[in-house]
Amino acid sequence: CVVGGSPLVDLGPNFFEPTILTNVDTNSLIWCTETFGPVVAVTTFDTEDEAVTMANDSSVGLASYICTRDMSRIFRVSSALECGMVGVNEGIISSASAPFGGVKESGLGREGSALGIKEYLNTKYVFLNC
């Protein structure tokens, strides 16, 4: 643990400080679980392909995050990642105007944006030749 990890006792038994974990084993529970909390698990990789393979080796796929200035890498990696949303150089990617949702066990469909309503609509095509 680089920083954080301490319980916030005043808030209750399920609250912890924002936490950064390093050198995380990719077989560990924190790596393989979709954690909804202020925790980031970090490990190292040698190649871009290895990083994408590690990211996709999961049963969940809500969001992925990458940090780079290389535009080619942004589009290449974003396309290869098996997730519903990608944050590039930013950790807070949710917005009411953007579609929110994941793939795999992280859900089907999208919330928010114009795409969010599509799950509740039935589209009908009518052709009329008078």
Image: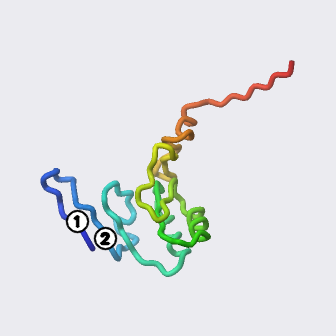
Up-down: is 94 above or below 122? below
Residue at the limit of the structure toward the bottom, as seen here? 46
Horizontally, residue 73 falls left or right of residue 129, namely left
Q: In the image, residue 1 lies at what x, y percent?
A: 26, 72
Cβ atoms under marks 1 and 2 closer than 8 Å: yes
Q: In the image, residue 87 lies at what x, y percent?
A: 48, 60
Residue drawn 65% across the image and 31% down it: 123
| Tag 1: amino acid | Gly
* Mark 1, residue position: 5
Q: Find numbered disc 2 in the image and state the secondary structure of the residue it sits on.
A: strand
Residue drawn 49% across the image and 41% down it: 112
Horizontally, residue 80 falls left or right of residue 90, namely right
Residue drawn 58% across the image and 64% down it: 80
Q: In the image, residue 65 lies at what x, y percent?
A: 46, 63
Q: Find numbered disc 1 in the image and state the secondary structure of the residue it sits on.
A: loop
Residue at the limit of the structure toward the top, as seen here? 130
Q: In the image, residue 40 lies at what x, y percent?
A: 35, 65
Crowding around mark 1 (Cα neighbors within 10 Å: few <14, some 14 to 19, many 20+) is some
